[in-house]
Amino acid sequence: MGRLFGTDGVRGVANADLTAELALGLSVAAAHVLAEAGTFAGHRATAVVGRDPRASGEFLEAAVVAGLASAGVDVLRVGVLPTPAVAYLTGALGADIGVMLSASHNAMPDNGVKFFARGGHKLADELEDRIETVYEQHRTGEPWNRPTGAGVGRVTDYAEGFDRYVAHLIGVLPNRLDGLKVVLDEAHGAAARVSPEAFARAGAEVVTIGAEPDGLNINDGCGSTHLALLRAAVVEHGADLGIAHDGDADRCLAVDASGEEVDGDQILAVLALAMREAGQLRKDTVVGTVMSNLGFKIAMEREGIQLVQTGVGDRYVLESMKAEGYALGGEQSGHVIVLDHATTGDGTLTGLMLAARVAATGRGLAELAGVMRRLPQVLVNVPDVDKSRVKTSAELAAAVSDAERELGATGRVLLRPSGTEPLVRVMVEAADIEQARAVAGRLADVVKSALG
Protein backbone atom coordinates (compact mmCIF):
# COMPACT_ATOMS: atom_id res chain seq x y z
CA MET A 1 0.00 0.00 0.00
CA GLY A 2 1.36 3.42 -0.95
CA ARG A 3 1.40 6.12 1.72
CA LEU A 4 -2.12 7.39 2.22
CA PHE A 5 -1.22 10.57 4.08
CA GLY A 6 0.13 13.47 2.05
CA THR A 7 1.32 16.81 3.41
CA ASP A 8 -2.27 17.71 4.30
CA GLY A 9 -4.13 14.55 5.28
CA VAL A 10 -5.63 11.86 3.04
CA ARG A 11 -7.12 13.15 -0.22
CA GLY A 12 -8.65 11.69 -3.35
CA VAL A 13 -11.77 11.52 -5.47
CA ALA A 14 -14.64 10.96 -3.05
CA ASN A 15 -16.30 7.55 -3.35
CA ALA A 16 -13.54 6.36 -5.68
CA ASP A 17 -10.21 6.88 -3.90
CA LEU A 18 -11.64 8.17 -0.63
CA THR A 19 -14.48 5.80 0.19
CA ALA A 20 -16.77 5.56 3.21
CA GLU A 21 -14.97 2.35 4.17
CA LEU A 22 -11.59 4.08 4.09
CA ALA A 23 -12.82 7.07 6.10
CA LEU A 24 -14.39 4.78 8.71
CA GLY A 25 -11.33 2.53 8.92
CA LEU A 26 -8.90 5.44 9.27
CA SER A 27 -11.03 6.96 12.03
CA VAL A 28 -11.09 3.71 14.00
CA ALA A 29 -7.35 3.29 13.46
CA ALA A 30 -6.69 6.87 14.61
CA ALA A 31 -8.68 6.26 17.79
CA HIS A 32 -6.72 3.08 18.55
CA VAL A 33 -3.33 4.66 17.79
CA LEU A 34 -3.99 7.69 19.98
CA ALA A 35 -5.24 5.40 22.76
CA GLU A 36 -2.02 3.38 22.50
CA ALA A 37 -0.02 6.62 22.67
CA GLY A 38 -1.70 7.50 25.96
CA THR A 39 -3.75 10.43 24.64
CA PHE A 40 -6.96 9.09 26.19
CA ALA A 41 -5.45 7.91 29.46
CA GLY A 42 -7.60 8.55 32.52
CA HIS A 43 -10.65 9.97 30.77
CA ARG A 44 -13.31 9.28 28.16
CA ALA A 45 -12.07 10.35 24.74
CA THR A 46 -13.72 13.19 22.80
CA ALA A 47 -13.46 14.22 19.14
CA VAL A 48 -14.52 17.31 17.17
CA VAL A 49 -15.65 16.57 13.60
CA GLY A 50 -16.33 19.22 10.93
CA ARG A 51 -16.52 19.44 7.17
CA ASP A 52 -16.75 21.78 4.19
CA PRO A 53 -19.99 21.91 2.13
CA ARG A 54 -19.07 19.29 -0.51
CA ALA A 55 -21.88 16.82 -1.14
CA SER A 56 -19.52 13.94 -0.44
CA GLY A 57 -18.76 15.40 2.97
CA GLU A 58 -22.18 14.30 4.12
CA PHE A 59 -21.54 10.56 3.78
CA LEU A 60 -17.87 10.85 4.73
CA GLU A 61 -18.81 12.71 7.91
CA ALA A 62 -21.23 9.90 8.75
CA ALA A 63 -18.48 7.33 8.21
CA VAL A 64 -15.94 9.19 10.36
CA VAL A 65 -18.44 9.74 13.16
CA ALA A 66 -19.45 6.07 13.04
CA GLY A 67 -15.82 4.95 13.15
CA LEU A 68 -14.91 7.12 16.12
CA ALA A 69 -18.03 6.27 18.11
CA SER A 70 -17.57 2.55 17.43
CA ALA A 71 -14.08 2.89 18.93
CA GLY A 72 -15.49 4.41 22.11
CA VAL A 73 -14.88 8.09 21.30
CA ASP A 74 -17.58 10.68 22.06
CA VAL A 75 -18.11 12.94 19.06
CA LEU A 76 -19.00 16.64 18.89
CA ARG A 77 -20.28 17.21 15.36
CA VAL A 78 -19.80 20.90 14.47
CA GLY A 79 -21.08 20.73 10.88
CA VAL A 80 -19.84 23.01 8.10
CA LEU A 81 -16.97 25.13 9.45
CA PRO A 82 -13.49 26.10 8.20
CA THR A 83 -10.51 23.86 8.87
CA PRO A 84 -8.99 26.40 11.30
CA ALA A 85 -12.29 26.48 13.19
CA VAL A 86 -12.12 22.72 13.74
CA ALA A 87 -8.49 23.08 14.87
CA TYR A 88 -9.43 25.92 17.24
CA LEU A 89 -12.42 24.09 18.70
CA THR A 90 -10.36 20.93 19.21
CA GLY A 91 -8.08 22.95 21.46
CA ALA A 92 -10.69 25.19 23.07
CA LEU A 93 -12.99 22.29 24.00
CA GLY A 94 -10.17 20.12 25.31
CA ALA A 95 -10.89 17.42 22.74
CA ASP A 96 -8.43 14.58 22.19
CA ILE A 97 -8.76 14.51 18.41
CA GLY A 98 -10.15 16.72 15.63
CA VAL A 99 -11.21 15.59 12.18
CA MET A 100 -11.83 17.85 9.18
CA LEU A 101 -13.37 16.61 5.94
CA SER A 102 -12.21 18.81 3.08
CA ALA A 103 -10.05 18.90 -0.03
CA SER A 104 -9.31 22.60 0.46
CA HIS A 105 -8.93 24.36 -2.93
CA ASN A 106 -9.41 21.17 -4.97
CA ALA A 107 -12.38 20.71 -7.29
CA MET A 108 -15.70 19.46 -5.90
CA PRO A 109 -15.31 15.71 -6.74
CA ASP A 110 -12.30 15.48 -4.39
CA ASN A 111 -12.45 15.27 -0.64
CA GLY A 112 -10.05 14.63 2.21
CA VAL A 113 -9.67 13.57 5.83
CA LYS A 114 -7.37 15.57 8.09
CA PHE A 115 -6.69 14.68 11.73
CA PHE A 116 -5.71 17.08 14.51
CA ALA A 117 -4.09 16.11 17.78
CA ARG A 118 -5.01 17.48 21.20
CA GLY A 119 -4.63 21.26 21.20
CA GLY A 120 -5.59 21.51 17.51
CA HIS A 121 -2.14 20.73 16.12
CA LYS A 122 -1.48 18.56 13.07
CA LEU A 123 -0.60 14.96 13.82
CA ALA A 124 3.09 14.08 13.83
CA ASP A 125 4.33 12.09 10.83
CA GLU A 126 5.06 9.05 13.00
CA LEU A 127 1.45 8.98 14.24
CA GLU A 128 0.12 9.20 10.68
CA ASP A 129 2.43 6.32 9.70
CA ARG A 130 1.18 4.28 12.65
CA ILE A 131 -2.46 4.98 11.72
CA GLU A 132 -1.79 3.69 8.20
CA THR A 133 -0.13 0.55 9.54
CA VAL A 134 -2.95 -0.21 11.98
CA TYR A 135 -5.60 0.53 9.35
CA GLU A 136 -3.98 -1.91 6.92
CA GLN A 137 -3.63 -4.62 9.56
CA HIS A 138 -7.32 -4.56 10.33
CA ARG A 139 -8.40 -4.04 6.72
CA THR A 140 -6.81 -7.36 5.84
CA GLY A 141 -8.50 -9.34 8.59
CA GLU A 142 -7.17 -8.72 12.09
CA PRO A 143 -10.28 -7.98 14.24
CA TRP A 144 -10.76 -4.75 16.19
CA ASN A 145 -11.16 -4.74 19.95
CA ARG A 146 -14.64 -3.18 20.04
CA PRO A 147 -16.30 -1.63 23.10
CA THR A 148 -19.91 -2.56 23.85
CA GLY A 149 -22.72 -1.24 26.01
CA ALA A 150 -21.88 2.05 27.73
CA GLY A 151 -18.38 1.85 26.25
CA VAL A 152 -19.46 3.01 22.77
CA GLY A 153 -19.10 6.68 21.88
CA ARG A 154 -22.00 9.13 21.99
CA VAL A 155 -22.65 11.65 19.19
CA THR A 156 -23.76 15.24 19.87
CA ASP A 157 -24.38 18.13 17.47
CA TYR A 158 -22.40 21.13 18.74
CA ALA A 159 -24.07 24.12 17.07
CA GLU A 160 -22.32 26.51 19.48
CA GLY A 161 -19.08 25.98 17.58
CA PHE A 162 -19.98 28.70 15.07
CA ASP A 163 -20.43 31.48 17.62
CA ARG A 164 -17.51 30.32 19.73
CA TYR A 165 -15.13 30.47 16.75
CA VAL A 166 -16.41 33.86 15.54
CA ALA A 167 -16.05 35.27 19.07
CA HIS A 168 -12.46 34.01 19.12
CA LEU A 169 -11.68 35.78 15.84
CA ILE A 170 -13.16 39.08 17.02
CA GLY A 171 -11.43 38.77 20.38
CA VAL A 172 -7.92 38.68 18.96
CA LEU A 173 -8.27 41.66 16.59
CA PRO A 174 -6.11 44.64 17.57
CA ASN A 175 -8.79 47.16 16.48
CA ARG A 176 -12.21 47.37 14.87
CA LEU A 177 -12.94 47.74 11.15
CA ASP A 178 -15.48 50.58 11.34
CA GLY A 179 -15.52 52.65 8.15
CA LEU A 180 -14.14 49.91 5.90
CA LYS A 181 -16.06 48.40 2.99
CA VAL A 182 -14.89 44.87 2.25
CA VAL A 183 -15.85 42.37 -0.46
CA LEU A 184 -15.55 38.73 0.64
CA ASP A 185 -15.29 35.84 -1.84
CA GLU A 186 -16.10 32.70 0.11
CA ALA A 187 -15.50 30.18 -2.73
CA HIS A 188 -18.93 28.67 -1.93
CA GLY A 189 -17.00 26.97 0.83
CA ALA A 190 -16.73 26.39 4.55
CA ALA A 191 -16.46 30.08 5.54
CA ALA A 192 -19.62 31.21 3.70
CA ARG A 193 -21.31 32.03 7.04
CA VAL A 194 -18.34 32.50 9.34
CA SER A 195 -16.33 35.11 7.45
CA PRO A 196 -19.16 37.59 6.66
CA GLU A 197 -20.38 37.30 10.25
CA ALA A 198 -16.92 37.97 11.68
CA PHE A 199 -16.23 40.98 9.43
CA ALA A 200 -19.68 42.44 10.14
CA ARG A 201 -19.31 42.01 13.93
CA ALA A 202 -15.92 43.73 13.67
CA GLY A 203 -17.61 46.79 12.15
CA ALA A 204 -16.97 46.44 8.42
CA GLU A 205 -19.54 47.02 5.69
CA VAL A 206 -19.61 43.62 3.98
CA VAL A 207 -20.38 42.62 0.40
CA THR A 208 -20.28 38.87 -0.28
CA ILE A 209 -19.81 36.82 -3.42
CA GLY A 210 -19.38 33.05 -3.65
CA ALA A 211 -21.32 32.63 -0.42
CA GLU A 212 -24.11 30.32 -1.55
CA PRO A 213 -22.72 26.77 -1.24
CA ASP A 214 -24.96 24.02 -2.61
CA GLY A 215 -22.60 21.08 -2.18
CA LEU A 216 -21.57 21.15 -5.84
CA ASN A 217 -20.19 24.65 -6.52
CA ILE A 218 -17.26 24.83 -4.09
CA ASN A 219 -14.19 26.55 -5.66
CA ASP A 220 -16.04 26.69 -9.00
CA GLY A 221 -14.58 29.75 -10.76
CA CYS A 222 -14.32 31.67 -7.50
CA GLY A 223 -12.28 31.96 -4.33
CA SER A 224 -8.53 32.32 -3.86
CA THR A 225 -7.67 30.32 -6.99
CA HIS A 226 -9.92 32.43 -9.27
CA LEU A 227 -9.67 36.12 -8.36
CA ALA A 228 -11.33 37.70 -11.43
CA LEU A 229 -14.78 37.92 -9.83
CA LEU A 230 -13.38 39.49 -6.66
CA ARG A 231 -11.33 42.03 -8.60
CA ALA A 232 -14.42 43.12 -10.52
CA ALA A 233 -16.63 43.23 -7.42
CA VAL A 234 -14.19 45.39 -5.44
CA VAL A 235 -14.08 47.97 -8.22
CA GLU A 236 -17.84 47.80 -8.85
CA HIS A 237 -18.73 48.37 -5.19
CA GLY A 238 -15.98 50.92 -4.50
CA ALA A 239 -14.67 48.78 -1.68
CA ASP A 240 -11.49 49.42 0.27
CA LEU A 241 -10.28 45.85 -0.26
CA GLY A 242 -11.36 42.33 -1.10
CA ILE A 243 -10.61 39.05 0.63
CA ALA A 244 -10.70 35.62 -1.05
CA HIS A 245 -10.73 32.26 0.71
CA ASP A 246 -10.43 28.71 -0.60
CA GLY A 247 -12.89 25.89 0.06
CA ASP A 248 -11.87 25.23 3.66
CA ALA A 249 -10.77 28.81 4.40
CA ASP A 250 -7.29 28.02 5.62
CA ARG A 251 -5.84 30.52 3.16
CA CYS A 252 -6.42 34.14 2.21
CA LEU A 253 -5.50 36.27 -0.78
CA ALA A 254 -6.50 39.90 -1.14
CA VAL A 255 -7.32 42.56 -3.71
CA ASP A 256 -6.67 46.28 -3.24
CA ALA A 257 -9.14 49.06 -4.02
CA SER A 258 -8.07 49.19 -7.67
CA GLY A 259 -8.56 45.45 -8.16
CA GLU A 260 -4.88 44.46 -8.02
CA GLU A 261 -3.94 41.16 -6.37
CA VAL A 262 -2.13 41.14 -3.04
CA ASP A 263 -0.57 37.70 -2.57
CA GLY A 264 0.54 35.77 0.49
CA ASP A 265 4.05 37.21 0.51
CA GLN A 266 2.69 40.77 0.48
CA ILE A 267 0.18 39.93 3.22
CA LEU A 268 3.01 38.50 5.33
CA ALA A 269 5.04 41.67 4.77
CA VAL A 270 2.17 43.90 5.91
CA LEU A 271 1.44 41.77 8.98
CA ALA A 272 5.13 41.42 9.89
CA LEU A 273 5.52 45.20 10.11
CA ALA A 274 2.26 45.53 12.07
CA MET A 275 3.25 42.83 14.54
CA ARG A 276 6.75 44.23 15.02
CA GLU A 277 5.23 47.65 15.72
CA ALA A 278 3.03 46.02 18.36
CA GLY A 279 5.95 44.09 19.87
CA GLN A 280 4.46 40.74 18.78
CA LEU A 281 6.96 39.65 16.09
CA ARG A 282 9.17 37.41 18.19
CA LYS A 283 12.89 37.54 17.32
CA ASP A 284 11.96 40.02 14.53
CA THR A 285 11.57 36.98 12.27
CA VAL A 286 9.00 35.77 9.75
CA VAL A 287 8.97 32.25 8.27
CA GLY A 288 8.38 31.61 4.56
CA THR A 289 9.24 28.87 2.08
CA VAL A 290 11.80 28.50 -0.69
CA MET A 291 9.06 29.68 -3.06
CA SER A 292 8.74 33.06 -1.31
CA ASN A 293 9.29 35.84 -3.82
CA LEU A 294 12.76 37.37 -3.77
CA GLY A 295 11.09 40.76 -3.48
CA PHE A 296 9.72 39.66 -0.09
CA LYS A 297 13.18 38.73 1.14
CA ILE A 298 14.66 42.01 -0.10
CA ALA A 299 11.89 44.00 1.62
CA MET A 300 12.29 42.18 4.93
CA GLU A 301 16.05 42.71 4.89
CA ARG A 302 15.52 46.41 4.23
CA GLU A 303 13.09 46.62 7.17
CA GLY A 304 15.42 44.75 9.53
CA ILE A 305 13.30 41.60 9.69
CA GLN A 306 14.86 38.17 9.24
CA LEU A 307 13.28 35.70 6.81
CA VAL A 308 13.64 31.99 7.58
CA GLN A 309 12.79 29.76 4.61
CA THR A 310 11.57 26.15 4.75
CA GLY A 311 10.47 23.52 2.26
CA VAL A 312 7.18 24.03 0.42
CA GLY A 313 4.14 23.24 2.57
CA ASP A 314 2.49 24.97 5.51
CA ARG A 315 3.33 22.05 7.81
CA TYR A 316 7.04 22.78 7.34
CA VAL A 317 6.47 26.46 8.04
CA LEU A 318 4.60 25.51 11.21
CA GLU A 319 7.31 23.08 12.31
CA SER A 320 9.93 25.82 12.07
CA MET A 321 7.73 28.30 13.92
CA LYS A 322 7.04 25.89 16.78
CA ALA A 323 10.66 24.74 17.04
CA GLU A 324 12.12 28.26 17.22
CA GLY A 325 9.25 30.17 18.82
CA TYR A 326 8.44 32.40 15.85
CA ALA A 327 5.05 34.14 15.74
CA LEU A 328 4.34 34.63 12.02
CA GLY A 329 4.82 32.51 8.93
CA GLY A 330 3.18 31.48 5.70
CA GLU A 331 3.25 30.84 1.99
CA GLN A 332 2.81 32.83 -1.19
CA SER A 333 -0.44 30.91 -1.77
CA GLY A 334 -2.03 32.64 1.22
CA HIS A 335 -1.54 30.12 4.02
CA VAL A 336 -0.68 32.51 6.85
CA ILE A 337 -0.11 31.26 10.41
CA VAL A 338 -0.33 33.65 13.36
CA LEU A 339 0.78 31.20 16.02
CA ASP A 340 -0.40 33.20 19.03
CA HIS A 341 -3.98 32.88 17.80
CA ALA A 342 -4.12 29.79 15.55
CA THR A 343 -2.45 26.40 15.20
CA THR A 344 -2.85 26.32 11.41
CA GLY A 345 -3.37 28.68 8.49
CA ASP A 346 -6.56 30.69 9.08
CA GLY A 347 -7.88 32.65 6.10
CA THR A 348 -10.59 34.51 8.00
CA LEU A 349 -8.21 35.56 10.76
CA THR A 350 -5.63 36.66 8.19
CA GLY A 351 -8.19 38.72 6.28
CA LEU A 352 -9.42 40.35 9.49
CA MET A 353 -5.89 41.25 10.60
CA LEU A 354 -5.07 42.67 7.16
CA ALA A 355 -8.23 44.78 7.20
CA ALA A 356 -7.47 45.88 10.76
CA ARG A 357 -4.11 47.20 9.61
CA VAL A 358 -5.80 49.21 6.85
CA ALA A 359 -8.29 50.62 9.37
CA ALA A 360 -5.66 51.41 12.00
CA THR A 361 -3.26 53.20 9.65
CA GLY A 362 -5.78 54.92 7.38
CA ARG A 363 -3.58 53.82 4.47
CA GLY A 364 -4.88 51.90 1.47
CA LEU A 365 -3.95 48.25 1.00
CA ALA A 366 -2.00 49.11 -2.16
CA GLU A 367 0.20 51.51 -0.18
CA LEU A 368 0.73 49.01 2.64
CA ALA A 369 1.53 46.16 0.24
CA GLY A 370 3.97 48.47 -1.56
CA VAL A 371 6.50 47.76 1.18
CA MET A 372 7.68 44.99 -1.17
CA ARG A 373 8.08 44.89 -4.91
CA ARG A 374 7.03 41.51 -6.22
CA LEU A 375 9.68 40.41 -8.74
CA PRO A 376 8.44 38.66 -11.90
CA GLN A 377 8.41 34.90 -11.36
CA VAL A 378 8.31 32.23 -14.08
CA LEU A 379 7.58 28.57 -13.31
CA VAL A 380 8.15 25.83 -15.90
CA ASN A 381 7.27 22.17 -15.26
CA VAL A 382 9.53 19.71 -17.06
CA PRO A 383 7.81 16.29 -17.21
CA ASP A 384 9.10 12.76 -17.81
CA VAL A 385 12.61 13.24 -16.41
CA ASP A 386 14.61 11.52 -13.68
CA LYS A 387 13.89 13.96 -10.86
CA SER A 388 16.13 12.02 -8.46
CA ARG A 389 19.23 13.36 -10.29
CA VAL A 390 18.46 17.08 -9.86
CA LYS A 391 21.13 17.50 -7.17
CA THR A 392 23.77 15.24 -8.75
CA SER A 393 23.85 16.31 -12.41
CA ALA A 394 27.04 18.25 -13.16
CA GLU A 395 25.56 19.56 -16.42
CA LEU A 396 22.56 20.95 -14.59
CA ALA A 397 24.70 22.45 -11.82
CA ALA A 398 26.79 24.30 -14.39
CA ALA A 399 23.69 25.67 -16.13
CA VAL A 400 22.27 26.88 -12.82
CA SER A 401 25.56 28.62 -11.96
CA ASP A 402 25.57 30.39 -15.32
CA ALA A 403 21.98 31.52 -14.80
CA GLU A 404 22.69 32.81 -11.30
CA ARG A 405 25.65 34.83 -12.56
CA GLU A 406 23.46 36.35 -15.27
CA LEU A 407 20.68 37.29 -12.85
CA GLY A 408 22.97 38.68 -10.14
CA ALA A 409 21.52 40.01 -6.89
CA THR A 410 18.14 40.90 -8.43
CA GLY A 411 17.16 37.37 -9.41
CA ARG A 412 17.32 33.75 -8.39
CA VAL A 413 16.87 30.18 -9.63
CA LEU A 414 15.17 27.26 -7.92
CA LEU A 415 14.98 23.70 -9.28
CA ARG A 416 12.61 21.50 -7.30
CA PRO A 417 11.59 17.87 -7.93
CA SER A 418 7.83 17.41 -7.67
CA GLY A 419 6.73 15.48 -4.61
CA THR A 420 3.93 13.68 -6.46
CA GLU A 421 4.76 13.61 -10.19
CA PRO A 422 7.73 12.59 -12.40
CA LEU A 423 8.69 16.15 -13.18
CA VAL A 424 11.04 18.94 -12.18
CA ARG A 425 9.84 22.46 -11.49
CA VAL A 426 12.09 25.26 -12.77
CA MET A 427 11.46 28.62 -11.09
CA VAL A 428 13.23 31.80 -12.12
CA GLU A 429 12.81 35.30 -10.69
CA ALA A 430 14.30 38.40 -12.28
CA ALA A 431 13.79 42.15 -12.32
CA ASP A 432 12.52 41.81 -15.91
CA ILE A 433 9.85 39.28 -16.93
CA GLU A 434 11.39 38.65 -20.36
CA GLN A 435 14.74 37.83 -18.80
CA ALA A 436 13.01 35.47 -16.35
CA ARG A 437 11.24 33.68 -19.22
CA ALA A 438 14.41 33.38 -21.26
CA VAL A 439 16.46 31.97 -18.38
CA ALA A 440 13.68 29.58 -17.37
CA GLY A 441 13.34 28.32 -20.92
CA ARG A 442 17.07 27.63 -21.24
CA LEU A 443 17.18 25.83 -17.89
CA ALA A 444 14.14 23.74 -18.82
CA ASP A 445 15.96 22.63 -21.97
CA VAL A 446 18.99 21.61 -19.92
CA VAL A 447 16.79 19.68 -17.48
CA LYS A 448 15.31 17.76 -20.43
CA SER A 449 18.69 16.93 -21.94
CA ALA A 450 20.49 16.17 -18.66
CA LEU A 451 17.76 14.23 -16.88
CA GLY A 452 15.62 12.91 -19.74
Image (tube, rainbow, N blue to C red):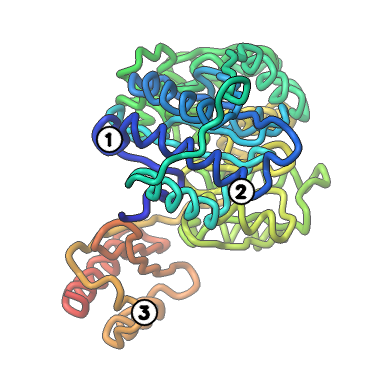
Residue at the location (35% across, 37% down)? 22
Marked residue nearer the N-terminal end (2 or 3): 2
Q: Amino acid at mark 3?
A: Lys
Q: Are marks 1 and 3 in contact (CB under 8 Å)?
A: no
Q: Which numbered tag is attached to residue 13?
A: 1
Marked residue nearer the N-terminal end (1 or 3): 1
In the image, 365 versus 33, the foreground residue is: 33
In the image, 287 versus 418, the foreground residue is: 418
Is residue 430 rendered to the left or right of residue 201? left
Q: Which numbered tag is attached to residue 36?
A: 2
Report, in whole angstroms, how far the alpha carbon at label 2 lies from the one at label 3: 40 Å
Residue at the location (22% across, 63% down)? 382
Residue at the location (44% across, 36% down)? 113
Query: From what the image shows, is residue 345 above or below residue 7?
Result: above
Query: From what the image shows, is residue 32 above or below residue 296?
Result: above
Q: Quadrant of the N terminus?
A: bottom left
In the image, 280 versus 11, the foreground residue is: 11
Q: Is residue 162 visible?
A: yes
Instruction: Quickly name the residue at label 3.
Output: 391
Query: From what the image shows, is residue 195 above or below residue 122?
Result: above
Q: Secondary structure at mark 2?
A: helix
Report, in whole angstroms, how far the alpha carbon at label 1 lies from the one at label 3: 33 Å
Is residue 283 rendered to the left or right of residue 434? right
In the image, 243 versus 238, the foreground residue is: 243
Q: Secondary structure at mark 1?
A: strand
Q: Secondary structure at mark 3?
A: loop
Q: Position of residue 255 (x, y in %)?
A: 49, 31
Q: Amino acid at mark 1?
A: Val
Query: From what the image shows, is residue 47 above or below residue 438?
Result: above
Q: How many marks?
A: 3
